[in-house]
Amino acid sequence: MSSANGGLSRRRFVGVLTGAATGLAGCSSSPEASSDASREASSEASSGSAPRKTPAGSAEDPSAGPAGTPSAPSPTGPRPLYLGTYTSVEGGGTGIGVAAYDAGSGRITGTGTVTGVANPSYLAVHPDGRTLYAVDEQDAGAVTAVRLSDRKVLGSRSTGGAGPCHLSVHPGGRWLLSANYGSGSVAVHPIGSSGALGELRDSVTHSSPAPGPGQDGPHAHQFVTGPDGGHVLAVDLGTDTVYSYRLNEGTGALTEVSRARTRAGAGPRHLTFHPGGRYAYLANEVDNTVAVCAYDRKSGRLSVGAPQSTGTGSATNYPAQFLVTANGSYAYLANRGHNSLTRYAVEAGGARLRLLDTVPVDGDFPRQIAFSPDGRLLFAANQRSGTVSVFHVNTTSGELRLAGKPFASPVAVCALPL
């Protein structure tokens, strides 16, 4: 393991936090989060006044419409839920957690584990719903395919880089995109008709611009498809840059078309598009801000707007991930240090975010958040507390209401409801 690619320092950070967990009820921060450790020593979160917090267990029922009645019938019955973890840390899991959740109540029940996958810290599903993909977040980075009908591991492929922390499936279903945090590179793998992965088809290492303040090199944190389908975007925390590539959907080849720079030291982590396709929202991990970005579907060019508050005050926060409702009216941001979800109203057709409030997440270090397919539930994977919190989402007002006690899951770093 080489400290040059970030793998060693990040794993050491995991061990420190895991050891502390035995006496402090905290849990580990991942190999991905060693960047958090260095920033705790070298960066200050930006200041801002915190808005009023909405009590998680208030008497108001945010799942109800304005007149107090449900806004629409809610589905019921069990649905599958897959949970990412770290297998190489004390207190971690033994593979991909398998669970079920009730689509009406949000209650989670554990049902098993898919073993044979190392450090499956981020998960994604194929558009046809038959295959699950996981990163193997370690120095010799890999991606793994799992057939969901019988939970058979279909094999792993090298990402050609270190510490993969994010992956996504191109909407066409033929290509898997992954981001290697440790080596600052992105990778493309072909997906076969069975869902299994082929050998690495293309990769790019972010060799420029120079790393931002306090960074030791590029750190690719996300690789996702743009709304047009022909461009893919890589968010790099280390270089303060979002790279746009044209994806050849026939060969898997990447061609860079543009770069969008944030302000120095922002540390961009995660990008989420508005359903209209003209705007996106960027979570900046290092300086504790967010930004509205304009997107040109024809060219794939992204333009980063001015930094905005996360509503968490001046304390260390490290915002993690954005979600946007399917109707494009509300956005939610996971705040790891503040242990909350920030709620924004989306205005002007997606061009503006208006901060509404923050909601306690009832867990420690919400690393990742996801909607249920119908958008009525929001899941938060709380890494240090080893729990998954579930919220009812009011589709009219955007308000959140905690759906019972969090579900215990070892070093919960990803929750994928299907």
Image (tube, grey):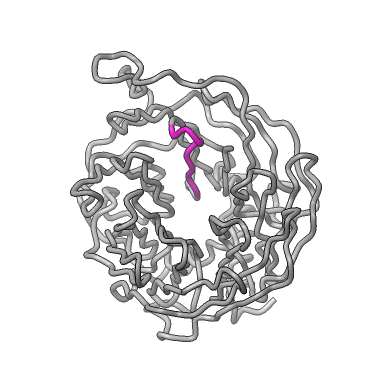
Lateral position of residue 62 relative to residue 382, left or right: left
- Give the image location of residue 15, x and y in percent: 64, 59
Magenta span contains residue 370: yes
Q: Quadrant of residue 167?
A: bottom right
User: Which residue occupies 69% across, 41% down?
Assistant: 97
Magenta residues (range) = 368-375
Q: On the rendered image, what quadrant is the C terminus found in?
A: top right
Lateral position of residue 63 relative to residue 223, left or right: left
User: Which residue occupies 61% across, 78% down?
Assistant: 3
Magenta span contains residue 76: no
User: Which residue occupies 48% across, 45% down?
Assistant: 369
Q: Is 137 placed above or below 72 here?
A: below
Q: Is 403 placed above or below 352 here?
A: above
Q: Nearer the viewer, residue 50 or 200?
A: 200
- Give the image location of residue 383, x and y in percent: 55, 47
Q: Nearer the viewer, residue 5 or 66?
A: 66
- Give the image location of residue 126, x and y in percent: 62, 50
- Give the image location of residue 61, x and y in percent: 34, 19
Q: Quadrant of residue 357?
A: top left
Q: Is 13 placed above or below 154 here?
A: below
What is the number of callouts on the image?
A: 0
Q: Quadrant of residue 180?
A: bottom right
